[in-house]
Amino acid sequence: MQLAVIFWTEEGCLKVVSSLKAAASIVCTALLLGNSAQASEIVGLNSGKVLQGSPPFSEAVRVGDTLYMSGQVGLEPSTQKLVPGGIEAEAKQTMANIKASIEASGYEMSDIVKCLVIMADMSELPAFSKIYLSSFEESKYPARSAFAASGLALDARVEVECIASK
């Protein structure tokens, strides 16, 4: 039987005693990295490039090097109304809004690691996907989930929420 004793402080691992020293070192490193992420400042960002006024939420929130974006719909920034033309027009505008918001936050489309797609009608997912895929470099697509929901904001056909990381 092997015994590992680990002494901890708020700064991290002080001392490891046992033959499991290498494993414990990995655990200490992981915990230290986790603690530094927890200590990161939370910054709400509102670019004004998509939504005018003061919405009751942040357009994006940055924690460390990770950017959590609020959902975007096919809102035309100049009119603050959904673009006409159905799923294709809304998909193009939604992705343009994501690009404007992410770039205003100091990130790029290639920094997006995960997207959540919410559809009013899942039968429109193939049409949305064609436009969505053209927004990213081929073979460097973010992870993605999709589901249908009724009653999207402004009666949109699609809403997309993304997470980016540098």
Image (cartoon, rainbow, N blue to C red):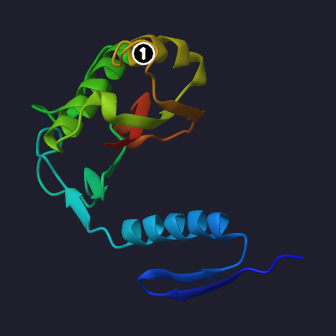
SS assignment at label 1: helix
Residue 73 seen in the current view: no
The one of 10 and 138 positioned closer to us in this rendering: 10
Residue neighbourhood size for the residue with mark 1, other residues' Cα within 10 Å, grouped as few (<14), some (14–19), many (≥20): some
Q: Amino acid at mark 1?
A: Leu
Which residue does the image show at 54% across and 87% down from the upper left?
8
Q: In screen coordinates, is 23 left or right of 45?
A: right
Which residue does the image show at 59% across and 34% down from the upper left?
147
- Image quarter in which the C terminus is found: top left
Residue that mark 1 sits on: 133
Give percent across and percent down for residue 2: 83, 76
Which residue does the image show at 11% across and 53% down from the upper left?
53
- Image quarter in which the N terminus is found: bottom right
Which residue does the image show at 43% across and 27% down from the upper left?
157
The one of 140 and 32 positioned closer to us in this rendering: 32
Residue 58 placement: quadrant: bottom left
Q: In screen coordinates, is 101 left or right of 92?
A: left
Residue 135 seen in the current view: yes
Give percent across and percent down for residue 93: 27, 23
Say above or below: 65 vs 24: above
Residue 110 placement: quadrant: top left
Residue 45 placement: quadrant: bottom left
Give percent across and percent down for residue 16: 61, 80
Give percent across and percent down for residue 126: 54, 13
